[in-house]
Amino acid sequence: MFYQFGKKENIRDRMFMILTLLCTFIPLVIAAGFFILLGGNSSEAFRTFGFKFILSTQWDPVQQLYGALPAISGTLVTTVIAVGIAAPLGFITALFLVNAPKWLGYPLSQALDLLAAIPSIIYGMWGLFVLAPVMQDYIQPFLADTLCLGKVPFFGEDYNGFGFLTAGLILALMILPYICAVMRDVFRMTPAPLQEAAYGIGCTSWEVASHIILRYGIRGIFGAVFIGLGRALGETMAVLFVIGGVAELPVSLFGSGTTIAATLANNFNEADGLLRSVLFALGLILMLLSLSVQAVAQLYLKNMDRKRGEK
C-alpha cells in the first residue's frame, strides 16, 4: 500500500511539473508567435524600402511612399510628456495618501483606483469634447501668448486644441492610477522605525520623504514609472481622438501628429498590399520598442542593486 501511494504521488509530481513547464513556455510561444506574425507580414515593406523605412518621414499612400519616423517620434514624444507629468504627480499623490488620515486617504485611494477601470475610448471622448476645447481656449493661449512660450522652439504659436501636448495630458491621466497604486504600496513597505527615527532627530516631512522613503523604495518607484511607460507606449484610442492624425515630425508641442498605435488604428481597415505590410512593420517596431524599454529598465535596476550592494 505504501509503495502504491508513493507511486501515485510520483505521478502527481510529474503531472504538476509538466503543467508548470507548459505554463512557463506558453507565454514564450505566444511571444514568438507575435514576432513570426509581425516579421513575416512586414517583410514586403522592408524589402521595398529597406531599413531606411525607419528613418523616412514620407507618408504618401497615393505614391505608395511610407516612412515610420513620424509615428515613432510621435509615440516617443507623447510618452515622454505623459511620464514626465504622471511620475512626479503620482509620487506626490501616493505620498499624501499614505500619510493622510484613513477617513480621507481611503476614499481618495478608491476614487483614484477607479480611474484605471475607465475604458480608454472614454478618455479619448473626454479629451475630444472637454480637454481639447479647454486647451484651445485657455491653456495653449496662456502658454503661447501670456508666457510667451510661442517663440520658444518646440512650442510654436499655432494651436487648435489638438496635438502632442493634449495627447500627452490624456496619457498622463490614464497612467497616473497605475503609477500611484504601485508607489503607494512601496511607501507602505518602508519600515516605520526608520521614519520615526528620522522624525525623532528633527527631520521634516520632505526630508523623510526624500532621504528615507525615496531611497528605501527607489526600485519600486522606478518599477512604477516603467509600468506607466509601457502602458503609454501602446495606447491607441485615447491618443487617436486628440493627436490630430497627421503623419508629420513633431516640431511643436501644439502641433498635430500621430503615433504608431494611432496609425495602425487609422489605416488597418482599408489596408492591403504594401500598406498592409507597412502597418505590420510598424507593429513590429512598436513591439521591439516596448521590449527595449523593459530590457533597459531591468538592466538599470540590476545595476542599481549592484551599486547599492557594493556600498
Image (cartoon, rainbow, N blue to C red):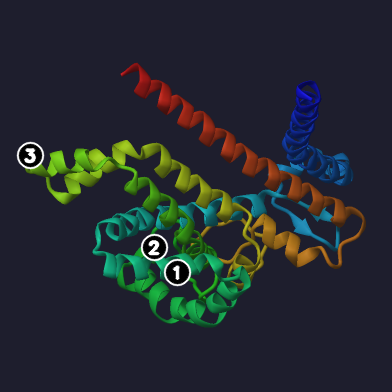
| Residue farthest to the right, as pictured | 273
Identified by mark 3, the residue type is Ile
Q: Which circle marks residue 157 in the picture? A: 1
**Measuring 73% from the left and 54% from the top, which residue is drawn there?**
58
Image marks 2 and 1: residues in contact by CB distance under 8 Å: yes
Identified by mark 1, the residue type is Glu
Mark 2 falls on what kind of element? Answer: helix
**Location of residue 88 in the rendering, given as x and y in whole percent from the top left corner:** 35, 53
**Location of residue 134 in the rendering, given as x and y in whole percent from the top left corner:** 44, 80
Mark 3 falls on what kind of element? Answer: loop
Which of the pair 151/178 is nearer the observer?
178
**Measuring 45% from the left and 76% from the top, which residue is drawn there?**
135
Q: Which residue is mark 3?
A: 201
Between the residue at mark 2 and the residue at mark 1, the CA separation in whole angstroms equals 7 Å
**Location of residue 278 in the rendering, given as x and y in whole percent from the top left corner:** 81, 51
Identified by mark 2, the residue type is Lys
Q: Which residue is mark 2?
A: 151
